[in-house]
Amino acid sequence: MYDIRAKTWAIMVLGEIVMENIISFFQEIFMLKENNSAKIGLADFRAEETPVERKKSRVNHTPKELRLSDLMRKGSC
């Protein structure tokens, strides 16, 4: 009886350890861990992008005169 409990417990513990290792392996491969200094697998190929500041441009659109015929033509399409 004791032998069966010990074997069952050992299998459960071993299974948990294996599952933790498998999960951490896939996290490393699919780059799910961001703060890891040692990169393994596809994480080595990730390009670290620097933010680019874009110039903000103002666009001044002056309202055009709208004709009823233009509105009717646009509405019929």
Image (cartoon, rainbow, N blue to C red):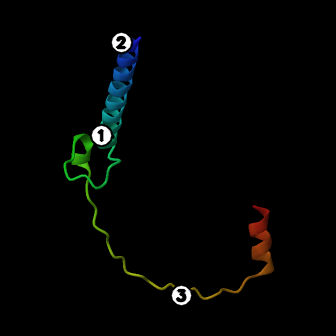
Going by the numbered disc 1, the residue's amino acid type is Ile
Q: Circle 3 — which element? A: loop
Residue indicated by mark 1: 29
State the image quarter where residue 41 is shown.
Answer: top left
Label 3 close to label 1 by CB (< 8 Å):
no
State which mark lies toward you, 1 or 2.
Answer: 2
Q: Where is residue 9 in the image (x, y as percent from the top left)?
A: 38, 22
Classify mark 2: residues with Cα within 10 Å, few (<14), some (14-19) or many (20+): few
Q: Position of residue 60 (x, y in %)?
A: 54, 87
Classify mark 1: residues with Cα within 10 Å, few (<14), some (14-19) or many (20+): some
Reply above or below: 32 against 58. above
State the image quarter where residue 70 is shown.
Answer: bottom right
Q: Which of marks 1 and 2 is nearer the N terminus?
A: 2
Q: In which quarter of the image is the C terminus?
A: bottom right
Q: Position of residue 22 (x, y in %)?
A: 33, 32
Q: Which residue is drawn at 25% across and 52% down?
A: 36
Going by the numbered disc 3, the residue's amino acid type is Asn
Pick the residue in front: 3 or 29. 3
Is 51 left, or right, of 61 in this rendering? left
Give the CA separation, mark 2 to mark 3: 83 Å
Q: Which of marks 2 and 3 is nearer the N terminus?
A: 2
Residue indicated by mark 3: 60
Give the CA separation, mark 3 to mark 1: 49 Å
